[in-house]
Image (spheres, helix red, strand yellow):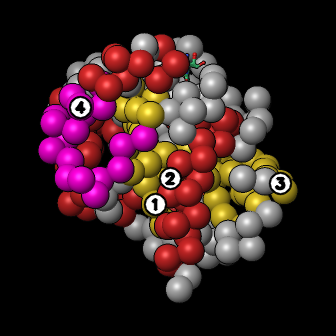
């Protein structure tokens, strides 16, 4: 994907801050430290547009990045980086822990065209499965992305995909994309999914 421009718009802590220009939005959801911010940098071919950290809980607000590509069907849209869940240790429920801010964003944005749920390719937790179920019930079916795939061998990757397909009870039609922000494996496939989601909504 040829990126014409990518810029940080702003960090939002509530609905009043969200952009009001009705531009399509693509959101990235997942556990703290799973690689959401890194994946956005990788998609945009930028090293430091989004802040990345070894310490979980780096992203604390809903961050909007405005993107323009050379693809005439895409025009302009936002990639939305969300804070990770599973950071607070004492977990009551996915949502109580995750925060009303994110729940509100995900359930109240007509601009939201696609949700990517990022999972660590090295292993998922019950929490990931309950977030997946919550997204399917309250938002939309997310595209699953197995991050940090560069940390696995080829055979481990196959096993990881199979384990996720079983744990999340995926059907043939559900997409599950191995991704690495180091090698950019999976980048074309993710762009294809983004393009499809935005183009579908404008038909
Ligand atoms: P929060 O903002 O805390 O929710 O985390 P995040 O999901 O945005 O994760 P972030 O992108 O900040 O990455 C967390 C750590 O994982 C950083 O040290 C990254 O360098 C590392 N990381 C992210 N993606 C990859 C990847 O594809 N491969 C490898 N090897 N490391 C990665
Ligand atoms: Mg982050």
Identify the element where label 1 is drawn.
strand
Residue 196 lies, with reference to residue 47, above or below; the image says below
> Rounded to the nearest whole Å, what is the CA distance between mark 4 and mark 2?
25 Å
> Rounded to the nearest whole Å, what is the CA distance between mark 2 and mark 3?
18 Å
> Rounded to the nearest whole Å, what is the CA distance between mark 3 and mark 1?
21 Å
Q: Nearer the viewer, residue 94 or 77?
A: 77
Residue 154 lies, with reference to residue 146, above or below; the image says above
Residue 65 magenta-highlighted: no
- Indicate which disc, 4 or 3, sits on the residue closer to the N terminus: 3
Residue placed under numbered mark 4 in the picture = 162
Q: Tags 3 and 1 in contact by the CB under 8 Å rule? A: no
Relative side of 199 to 1, left or right: left
Q: Nearer the viewer, residue 42 or 89?
A: 42
- Indicate which disc, 1 or 2, sits on the residue closer to the N terminus: 2
Q: Ligand 1 shows up in which quadrant of the image?
A: top right
In the image, the residue with mark 1 has its CB under 8 Å from the nearest atom of ligand 1: no
Relative side of 139 to 1, left or right: left
Residue placed under numbered mark 3 in the picture = 5
Magenta range is 160-177
- Indicate which disc, 2 or 3, sits on the residue closer to the N terminus: 3
Residue 44 lies, with reference to residue 60, above or below; the image says below
Query: Which label lies toward us, 4 or 2?
Result: 4
Can residue 127 be seen here? The reply is no
Residue placed under numbered mark 1 in the picture = 114
Marks counted in the figure total 4
Residue placed under numbered mark 2 in the picture = 27
Q: Tags 1 and 2 in contact by the CB under 8 Å rule? A: yes
* Residue depicted at x 56% and y 14%: 54
Relative side of 97 to 75, left or right: left
Identify the element where label 3 is drawn.
strand
């Amino acid at each position: 994907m040829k990126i014409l421009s990518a810029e940080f718009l702003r960090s939002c802590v509530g609905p009043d801050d969200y952009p009001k220009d009705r531009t399509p939005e693509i959101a990235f959801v997942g556990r703290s430290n799973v690689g959401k911010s890194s994946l956005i940098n990788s998609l945009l071919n930028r090293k430091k547009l989004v802040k990345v950290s070894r310490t979980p809980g780096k992203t604390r607000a809903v961050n909007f990045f405005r993107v323009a590509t050379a693809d005439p069907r895409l025009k302009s849209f936002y990639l939305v980086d969300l804070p990770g869940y599973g950071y607070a240790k004492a977990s009551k429920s996915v949502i109580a822990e995750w925060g009303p801010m994110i729940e509100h964003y995900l359930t109240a944005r007509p601009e939201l065209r696609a949700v990517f749920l990022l999972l660590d390719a090295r292993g998922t937790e019950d929490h990931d499965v309950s977030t997946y179920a919550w997204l399917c019930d309250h938002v939309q079916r997310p595209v699953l992305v197995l991050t940090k795939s560069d940390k696995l061998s080829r055979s481990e990757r196959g096993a990881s995909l199979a384990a996720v397909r079983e744990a999340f009870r995926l059907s043939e039609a559900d997409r599950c994309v191995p991704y690495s922000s180091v090698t950019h494996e999976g980048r074309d496939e993710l762009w294809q999914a983004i393009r499809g989601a935005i183009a579908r909504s404008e038909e």
